[in-house]
Image: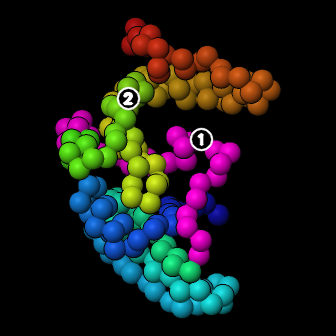
Amino acid sequence: MKIKKIHHVAYRCKDAKETVEWYQKYLNMDFILAIAENEVPSTKEPDPYMHIFLDAGGGNILAFFELPTKPEMGRDPNTPAWTQHLALEVDSMEDLLNTKARLEADGYKVIGPTDHTIFKSIYFFDPSGHRLELAYNTGTPDMHKKLDEVKWDMLNEWAETKRAPQHARWMHDGSFSEA
């Protein structure tokens, strides 16, 4: 068996309607489905929920649950806020910068663009506190080949030392050369 694709990714949200409207406004995602029940189908637990689905492009679905009977959402206090995030690809640097401008105009803090050499990205939080990244690919076939050649060496070194291997330092230090 081989996985065909991700059917959907689901997160919790604070407010389903606000979430749909926010993702439509800032990320141009279409609202494609809502499911609501008073009982969880898999566990039969009596717990009302609203489950919303958004079209994230390319057959990818982003879903959210609003759970009004549960305690307020929180974060894992042992995981830094920058770690867990959803990265979404955009078609152009113009799209990246225009989205940044729209978010900032409405008071959202945006970090970036950050240059990762193989892509440039911006980072921000949605109204429920989920960190999002928009990425515009800038990598060349040669860059991807170099990264592919060292991925196992990097992983194996990390597994032994728990220190960052230096095989792909060029991604963030500006030293990449096509030569």
Instruction: Give the magenta part as a residue range.
Output: 70-98
Q: Residue at x 53, y 26 (%)?
A: 147
Q: Secondary structure at mark 1?
A: loop
| Mark count | 2
The kind of residue tagged 2 is Thr
Q: Is residue 8 visible?
A: no
Nearer to us of marks 2 and 1 is 1
Q: Secondary structure at mark 2?
A: strand
Q: Position of residue 97 (x, y in %)?
A: 23, 38
Tell me the tag on residue 124: none
Give the residue pinned by disc 1.
80
Locate the N terminus and report the quarter of the image it occupies: bottom right
Q: Residue at x 62, y 90 (%)?
A: 46
Residue density around tag 2, few if under 14, some if 14–19, many if 20 or more, within 10 Å = few
How would you classify the magenta stretch by its main secondary structure?
loop
| Residue 36 drawn above or below residue 141 | below
| Residue 60 falls left or right of residue 84 | left
| Residue 150 drawn above or below residue 131 | above
The kind of residue tagged 1 is Pro
Residue density around tag 1, few if under 14, some if 14–19, many if 20 or more, within 10 Å = few
Q: Is residue 134 visible?
A: yes
| Residue 59 drawn above or below residue 34 | above
| Residue 4 drawn above or below residue 82 | below
Query: What's the distance in space between the residues labelled 2 and 1, CA to CA?
Result: 18 Å
Q: Quadrant of residue 92?
A: top left
Give the residue pinned by disc 2.
114
Q: Position of residue 171 (x, y in %)?
A: 47, 21
Q: Earlier in the sequence, mark 2 or mark 1?
A: 1
Q: Nearer the viewer, residue 49 or 57?
A: 49
